[in-house]
Amino acid sequence: MKALPRSKNFLGIGKEHSAWATSRIAILSAPYEHSVSYGGGTAKGPAAILEASHYVEFWDEDFKRELCFDHGIAAVAPLSFGKKKDKDVLDIIEAAVDTALDEGKFVVTLGGEHTISAAPIHAHFRRHPGMSVLQFDAHSDLRESYLGNPYSHASVMARVAEFMPGERIVQAGIRAQCIEEHQMIRDRGIRTFYACDMHAGVHGARWQDAVADALADEVYITFDVDYFDPSIMPATGTPEPGGFQWDETVALLKIIGAKKRIVGFDVVELAPMRSLTFPSFLAAKLVSKLLNAAFMGR
Ligand SMILES: [Mn+2]
């Protein structure tokens, strides 16, 4: 795969730390947007994250290192889907993730709408059959189909639940769902942490510990940015009030980084706003934090 030049890559790092052959980390862009239900714009998410990442510091104040110079980060040219959609698009993404994993890379996938996550989750699950998937999201995305489309962003975790055991799907931040999704969570034993319970202290003094305890040793993270409160993340298709703040989220990532092994992750559903740059920056810094959590002790 071919790495993007410094002007377009992650963090704006020089060739010696961003070439494909020598980088341990690969960032794939999957700018797929088809099943929009409310606000649009997620196709522009990956490019906005890469652009904003040039303003993220190399040095991470939480993890006390410059990860990009230790391991190398290669961002590659965005995948293109032509007129393809649904399953055909997932096949293209999964093939790309497979290629990168086969070359020993730690793979980050940027969306795009949440639909795309089924592909990297499946690719990682085939290699790590004991893993959990941790879904940060306002919505449980467990609808069998939405507006007639089983490959809707609102159905992505229903597709994942077709190949993963329910108890190894862990959802955090959920605050919008339909009754069928609620029943599926109960029937399949999906581990859902509802925002109302997390905020109310139902899971103890620190909900972060309860979420971490629900995970297997190996964890894949799928991060829908609408998990955050719209006050800090307004740039997403379906914002929901009552979301989460930055520090409490980073606190969980540090716990997972210390106690578990993050095998891969994706960040999806950023719909960048022309008038407001901070949401794109937040998403870029989130990618950096997730990478640091994943490489803790490595
Ligand atoms: Mn979602």
Image (tube, helix red, strand yellow):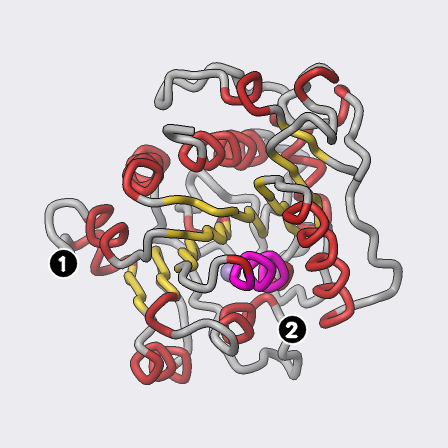
Q: Report how far apart the C-alphas of labels 1 and 2 lie in the structure.
A: 33 Å
Which amino acid, mark 1?
A: Val
Quadrant of the snapshot with the C terminus: top left
Q: Earlier in the sequence, mark 1 or mark 2?
A: 2
Residue 104 spot, x, y in % from top left: 62, 41
Give the number of the disc on residue 249.
none
Q: Residue at x 65, y 38 (%)?
A: 27
Mark 1 residue crowding within 10 angstroms, few (<14) / some (14–19) / many (20+):
few
Which amino acid, mark 2?
A: Tyr
Q: Residue at x 51, y 75 (%)?
A: 163
Residue 120 in the magenta stretch? The answer is yes
Residue nearest the viewer, comparing 80 with 277: 80
Classify residue 146 by image quadrant: bottom right
60 lies above or below 251? above
Q: Residue at x 32, y 84 (%)?
A: 187
Q: Secondary structure at mark 1?
A: loop
Give the number of the disc on residue 202.
1
Residue nearest the viewer, comparing 282 with 68: 68
Quadrant of the snapshot with the N terminus: top right
Residue 111 in the magenta stretch? The answer is no
Q: Secondary structure at mark 2?
A: loop
Q: Residue at x 58, y 34 (%)?
A: 280
Residue position for label 2: 151
Classify residue 24 by image quadrant: top right
Which SS type dominates the magenta stretch?
helix
Residue 79 spot, x, y in % from top left: 79, 49
Report the magenta residues as a range: 117-126
Residue nearest the viewer, comparing 188 with 264: 264
Residue nearest the viewer, comparing 81 with 248: 81
Residue 115 spot, x, y in % from top left: 62, 64
Mark 2 residue crowding within 10 angstroms, few (<14) / some (14–19) / many (20+):
many
Q: Is residue 251 left or right of residue 48?
A: left
